[in-house]
Amino acid sequence: MDCVYCGSSRIVRNGTRNSLQGLLCRDCGRQFNERSGTLFAGMKYKPEEVVFALRLRFIYRLSSREVSELMAEMGHPVSKNIVLFWADRFHASFQELQRRYRPEYSGIWHVDELHVRLRGGKGYVYVVEDDHRNVIALELTERRDGEATARVLRKAEAEAGFTPDVIVSDGAPAYPPAIAEAIPGARHVVAQFKGAQVSHRGRLVTVSNNLLERLNGTLRGWVRTLRGFKSLVAGNRALSILQAVYNLLRPHQGLGGLTPFQAAGGGGLTWDTLSKILPTAL
């Protein structure tokens, strides 16, 4: 291991602290260990413990209190506030994972929104998903209108890096003008539960928002566990983790137990390997 500060390879051992081997750089004289320079620096918890807590939180939809109690029973006591802190601390790392392992999105997108609790009142989560079950964008907003719709569509276009051929919606009045404004090159198709046939890249395909409704059900259950969102900032940070988890780490029964990332041919990313990847994601 080279020095995390100056890059020198002239390293010697320098005692232990919190069961970690300390190291000393002979060139710059600074001390460090394997976690120095990562988001785990200075933490008494192991990366595996943090990743397991986040897995319980975002895969099994447990509350922070339930995560705390379960980890204590397993011999890893951690407070519910620490669990919340970890979700906030590592959201940017999950965003980087989403960028690093970005899937190859399809040209057919589905957009919808669902009601959630925000600061004790009403809020909305806008969802954009492709027909391979990859979540392209999630956005928590205070309003349900054309401006919010256009914003999440632009966010999805920036994430994907291209303009979709088809956007499928449920026919809510806000969608036609918002789609025409944000992504004027896309064809808008209205198809909720009853499918509609469209021509796409030389073949006739049937599109509907049925699969997106299943994603909405997952989101509703997860938000219900949270008892809503306390703020737009905290909510959108949590949603950024959920997007990465949904695309890269959550098995889908409809995909034969694979994640969308694995179904598209990706490999090497699991919850077991995440504890090694996450510290260097930024």
Image (cartoon, rainbow, N blue to C red):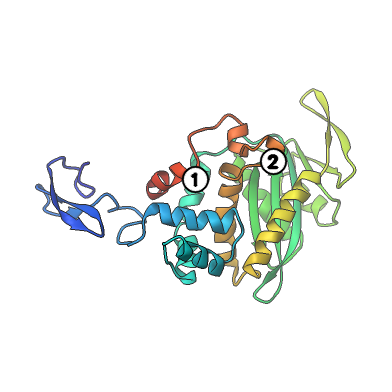
Tell me which corner region of the image, top left, top right, bottom left or bottom right, holds residue 251.
top right
Q: Is residue 154 above or below residue 255?
A: below
Residue located 9% across and 47% down the image = 26
How far apart marks 1 and 2 lie (CA) works out to 18 Å
Judge by depth and name the residue closer to the eye, 53 or 114. 53
Q: On the picture, is 63 further left or further right than 25? A: right
- Mark 2: which amino acid? Gln
- Residue 97: x and y in percent read 49, 45
> Which residue type carries mark 1?
Trp
Left or right: 168 in relation to 274: right
From the viewer's side, name the closer residue of 231 and 199. Answer: 231
Q: Secondary structure at mark 2?
A: helix
Residue 25 versus residue 83: which sits nearer the camera? 83
How many residues crowd mark 2 within 10 Å: few (<14), some (14–19), many (20+)?
A: few
Pointer 2 residue = 253
Q: Disc number at residue 271?
A: 1
Q: Tell me if 251 is positioned left or right of 124 in this view.
A: left
What kind of element bears circle 1?
helix
**In which quadrant will I find the N terminus?**
top left
Q: How many marks?
A: 2
Residue drawn at point x = 86 percent, y = 47 percent = 192
